[in-house]
């Protein structure tokens, strides 16, 4: 029922998928970036379902149409095809999660609800400090922040400093890989804006724990959002929907909730950790 597909399969241009394409933009990021995700695996039933996994350490992203019926077959396929993933993590519409829960396929799930936000128009935010790129001597510090981000959010719980050095180096050379500096010039937060996609996406927002509560992440996200809007595109981001401070922070900037999706794992496996707290 579910067969391997190519990265440019026609289903990614179907009306049904395009309706949900902002919520499932990570699928586009994985299939379009062959250098970063050379081992990505893509499957589909050809009409109502797409399954994309970048590697065994990350979520299996599952898109289904609103009237998708073959949920049992889909779950059986995931268990068999991705049994090497540790743990099996699934990102999907809430309907798929609810079905599994209600039918006792995997009871007592550990679930995280993600808010999918976009920003059509910015509100004013007063800056304290300024945006900047990292300096060459700060690359290892940025890499440590990325390691912390992966562990705290659960997005890459096994991240090591060596794994993050390449991305950290981009904070020196890529304009939209930014850091925020306080009034003394100290680097207190980082964030990325991916611009070469349909929906510019802000991600990997991280503030040193001792610097939280000072709105540095809010200022940095505001700055990156402004850059995207100036280029005529509507930026988006994901939040931990159940963590009210982050949602209030982004709403204060001007972000509006489009929809929610869920990230869940079976019991007796590693817990999904909450997303970064500003």
Image: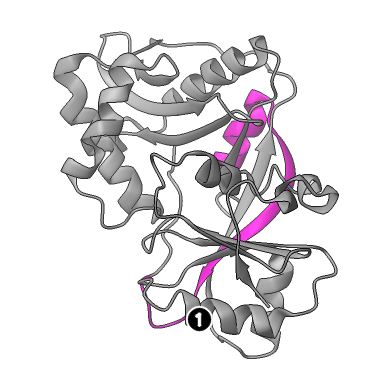
10 Å neighbourhood of mark 1: few (<14), some, or many (≥20)? few
In the rendered structure, the answer to whether residue 50 lies left or right of residue 214 reads right
Q: Could you tell me which secondary element the residue under label 1 belongs to? A: helix
In the rendered structure, the answer to whether residue 22 lies left or right of residue 56 reads right
- Residue 100 lies, with reference to residue 164, above or below; the image says below
Magenta highlight range: 244-270
Residue at 65 percent across and 78 percent down: it is 74
Classify residue 183 by image quadrant. Answer: top left
In the image, residue 205 lies at what x, y percent?
43, 34
In the rendered structure, the answer to whether residue 221 lies left or right of residue 145 reads right
> Can residue 23 be seen by looking at this rendering?
yes
The quadrant of the picture occupied by the N terminus is bottom right
> Can residue 245 be seen by looking at this rendering?
no
Residue at 39 percent across and 39 percent down: it is 35
Residue at 48 percent across and 61 percent down: it is 59
The residue nearer to you, when weighing 115 against 215, is 115
């Amino acid at each position: 029922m579910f067969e391997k597909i190519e990265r440019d399969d026609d289903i990614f241009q179907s009306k049904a998928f395009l309706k949900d394409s902002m919520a499932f933009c990570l699928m586009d990021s994985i299939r379009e970036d062959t250098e970063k995700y050379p081992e990505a695996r893509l499957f589909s039933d050809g009409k109502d379902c797409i399954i994309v996994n970048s590697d065994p350490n990350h979520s299996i992203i599952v898109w289904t149409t609103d009237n998708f019926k073959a949920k049992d077959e889909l779950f059986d396929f995931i268990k068999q095809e991705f049994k090497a993933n540790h743990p099996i993590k699934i990102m999907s519409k809430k309907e798929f999660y609810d079905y599994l829960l209600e039918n006792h396929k995997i009871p007592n799930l550990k679930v995280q609800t993600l808010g999918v936000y976009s920003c059509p128009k910015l509100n004013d935010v007063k800056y304290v400090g300024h945006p900047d790129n990292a300096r060459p001597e700060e690359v290892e510090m940025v890499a440590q922040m990325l390691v912390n981000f992966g562990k705290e959010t659960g997005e890459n719980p096994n991240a090591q400093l060596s794994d993050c050095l390449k991305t950290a180096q981009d904070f020196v050379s890529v304009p939209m890989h930014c850091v925020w500096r306080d009034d003394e010039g100290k680097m207190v937060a980082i964030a990325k804006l991916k611009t070469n996609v349909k929906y510019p996406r802000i991600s990997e927002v991280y503030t040193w724990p001792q610097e939280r509560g000072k709105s540095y992440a809010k200022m940095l996200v505001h700055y990156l959002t402004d850059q995207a809007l100036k280029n005529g595109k509507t930026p988006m981001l994901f939040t931990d929907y159940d963590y009210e401070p982050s949602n209030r922070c982004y709403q204060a900037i001007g972000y509006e909730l489009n929809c929610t999706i869920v990230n869940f794992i079976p019991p007796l496996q590693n817990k999904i950790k909450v997303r970064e707290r500003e």
